Amino acid sequence: MSEKPATKLTPMMEQYFEVKRGLPEGTLLLFRLGDFFELFYEDAVIASRLLGITLTKRQDYPMAGLPYHAADNYVTKLLAAGRKVALCDQSGPVKPGKLVKRTLTRILTPGTTLAASQLDANRNHYLCALAHDKRGLHASWLDLSTGEFRLASDPRIENLLPVLTALAPAEIVLAEGDLEHWQAQVAAHESGQAELRDLVQFCADRTRSEVPAYHFETAAGAKTVMDTLGVLNLEGFGLAATHPALGAAGALLYYATENLRSRPENLRKLQEYRSSGTLLLDPATLRNLEIFSSSRGTRDGTLLEAINRTRSATGARLLERWLSAPTLQLAEIHRRQHLVGELAAQPGRLAELQDSLSQVRDIPRILGRLQNRLRNPRELAGIRDSLAQFPKIRADIGDWGGQLADEYSARIAPLPELLDLLSRGLADELPGDVADGGMIRAGHDQELDLLRSLTSNNKTWLAQLEAEEQQRTGIKSLKVKFTNNFGYYIEVTKANLHLVPENYIRRQTTVGGERYITEELRQKEKEIFTSEERAIAREQDLFHALVSSVLAEAEPLASTADALAELDVLAGWATLAREWDYTCPIVDESDQLLIEEGRHPVVEQRLKAPEAAATASASSSAAFVPNDTELASNGAQLALITGPNMAGKSTYIRQVALIALLGHIGCWVPARSCRIGLVDRIFSRVGASDDLARGNSTFMVEMNETANILNNATRRSLIILDEIGRGTSTYDGLSIAWAVVEHLHADPEAGPRTLFATHYQELTQLEKHLPRLRNLSVTVKEWNDEIVFVRRVQPGAADRSYGIQVARLAGLPLSVIERAKTILSRLESEEAVVALPPTNQPAPAARPRKKITVEAIDDSQLSLL
Ligand SMILES: Nc1ncnc2c1ncn2[C@@H]1O[C@H](COP(=O)(O)OP(=O)(O)OP(=O)(O)O)[C@@H](O)[C@H]1O
């Protein structure tokens, strides 16, 4: 791109191409020219299209510019469009006729940006490197804005991909050619291609960057990691120097360093993530259960939103992390549950604590920016204002007593000296840019105060000069003025030129008059400039000293921020528990899942929302109807749920999965009582989801997801299946659903806890033959050929499906409803023939409904007659 033209270039364009040559392909170069960032050649064409800015021509090549002060907004848009942007700034003084020195200051990519305006405060922002070899999938991920840095390796892609999907990285780093290689393997149907296909899909959806493969070597990676973290070995992090994901970690650091144009300075540790310690939620389940994103692609209507009562950005991000990797460590689950209980027990104090937490600013991200050379005076004030809250929060927690006081008092460092320094040093009103000056408080530094008083005294002197000169010359309209180009001067209008005294030296003629200077004025101007320049320089030194004092305490600040983020999440859950009457579940090693009066956390809140209550109709009453659940892998393992359309089957099975999930993050749950035996993985196959863009039909997606479940579920898993087999003909679908139920029940002792919602009434007969299968149905009341939804789940199979009644509620024309009833009664009788109305064209022959009965051959094998 941007081919260098054959004609001779100006020195500035030579400079441009010099920088451009060193950039990774596809990077848009923003080149500073005075008050603008300019783009040239193809970059200009792309930017004008993406940003809607005007495309102009300079000599014979395209050019587009954007104002320097608004650059942030434009860069945000380019990153959102998946582009990489290099900033080349002026780094030397501007002198007429001389080429200004320019330096590449940083390369911004979707995964390496740090500016607050380019980050969602409530979301983590990951850059992730991936490698795959015979030993499995290796990954490392990094949130540069907060310094969180992890690595993981797993022999099976499917064990690691779920958590990576939940992290939703903004950008992926791969070794050159890897993706094409994987794609070729998938296309060639090599062994393991099903897993690889998921990996390819995961990568294909995201902004990717490639680096030479040698950056992914383990030994080199280990060295890069140690150099960046400033450690001599990796033992302190519990990592062997041969950990297979160190290559990915090294490649990630190499890439980040390249883009920041210097080493990331805010990384302190590298933590290993192990999928064996986590409840895994595969990508289909994340989507189906609407954990982070609703079916409409919004945050509204998600589990995350429903349980988020955090008051700070750090808390919101921690909640997202906990939810993306629910833990299987009972001790940790119990710890969180207990703390929620302590917090919920004192509502008055809880509200106060949350108030204080809401005033704590985003310390990890502020530190990240300060450490990586993005220094904004207002952010330093963010540290000051946060520090002001620390002592109060610490005292409140101390008074609280219990485990809260034991654990958290010690984790909050009050840092009174730093607070005092920042309070004395920083002004109340702060500029957004260090270059603007004015950030240091008067009285903080004698020298600065003196320089400032010189400047302001001089300015008073100038005002006096104007008055004196007006009097001396008799020119009433005489003015002492200042412009950037010209400095200070005396302006006299044309009509008064004859009154100008001798000592005035003429400098410039303007339309309305003349501009003069005097020796005295020149002298004063020098004094003013010097004192102003010295004041700014002094102020910048003082500011950087304050930054250094903050960075010297980066460690205690960061660990306090971690503790406060936890408190924020837990306090939020305590509020949630009080608001919605949640209960503390017993989470243990049993194989049970017992829920008394469970509710769907999202639907329940939606039904109570004012707009829902206002539109509540007969079919959706405003109050959520709670329901019980009883599952155990060696007892009631498989619940088959039948019931009319719209009765609440899907809601019920999802609510069970969501309650189980909440139990594993330590949150209380919407139920009267609850016991959850640890779940290693939640699987789901819910509703129809088209994947047409990737060439998969609805049925294919459904079967892929079902295959994944049957191949990977263990006795510890929880499975929810909603109407599998619907995407094909009735008998094919029924047969598949049937075989799936049998498979899940095949182990004679125990199997994955399963909820299976279906319209195939025929399956309910299986209860007689599969000892761990239980029929449940969602009841409705029938009244005058109409149905009323009661939303109660009860033992036993549903007798019929009421599809036609529901169709009527949906507003199908009455003639169609009546006709459907006639056809149904014929189909349900033994008669095979459905009479067609005389005017109609011949229609396909309706097939009679086969009577299906079940006969047992042995325990689990059934035959269809
Ligand atoms: N326990 C409940 N209390 C109150 N309202 C509920 C309850 N369960 C479900 N609903 C409401 O009923 C509507 C239909 O529920 P759902 O989609 O679960 O039915 P379904 O039986 O799966 O229907 P279909 O078979 O047509 O897919 C939902 O929009 C939900 O708001």
Image (cartoon, grey):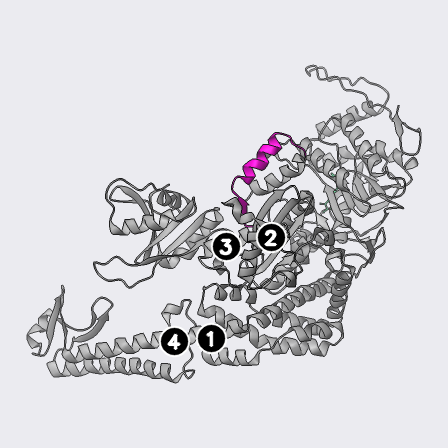
Is 617 placed left or right of 312 in the picture? right
Instruction: Measure the C-alpha gap from mark 3 to mark 4.
Output: 31 Å
Foreground label between 3 and 1: 3
Per the image, the residue denoted by label 3 is 256
Q: Earlier in the sequence, mark 4 or mark 1?
A: 4
Residue 169 part of the magenta-drawn span: yes
Per the image, the residue denoted by label 1 is 546
Identified by mark 3, the residue type is Ala
How many C-alpha atoms fall within 10 Å of the one at disc 3: few (<14), some, or many (≥20)?
many
Q: Earlier in the sequence, mark 3 or mark 4?
A: 3
Identified by mark 4, the residue type is Glu
Foreground label between 2 and 1: 2
Figure check: 682 above or below 356: above
User: Is the residue indicated by label 1 positioned so its CB lies within 8 Å of ligand 1?
Assistant: no
The percent position of residue 719, horizontal first and vertical second, equals: 77, 44
The quarter of the displayed image where residue 752 is located? top right
Extent of the magenta region: 168-191
Per the image, the residue denoted by label 4 is 539
Q: Earlier in the sequence, mark 3 or mark 2?
A: 2
Q: Helix, strand or loop at disc 2? A: helix
Is the C terminus in the top left, top right, bottom left or bottom right quadrant? top right
The percent position of residue 502, horizontal first and vertical second, equals: 7, 78
Residue at 61%, 43% (x, y): give it.
Answer: 132
Q: Helix, strand or loop at disc 4? A: helix
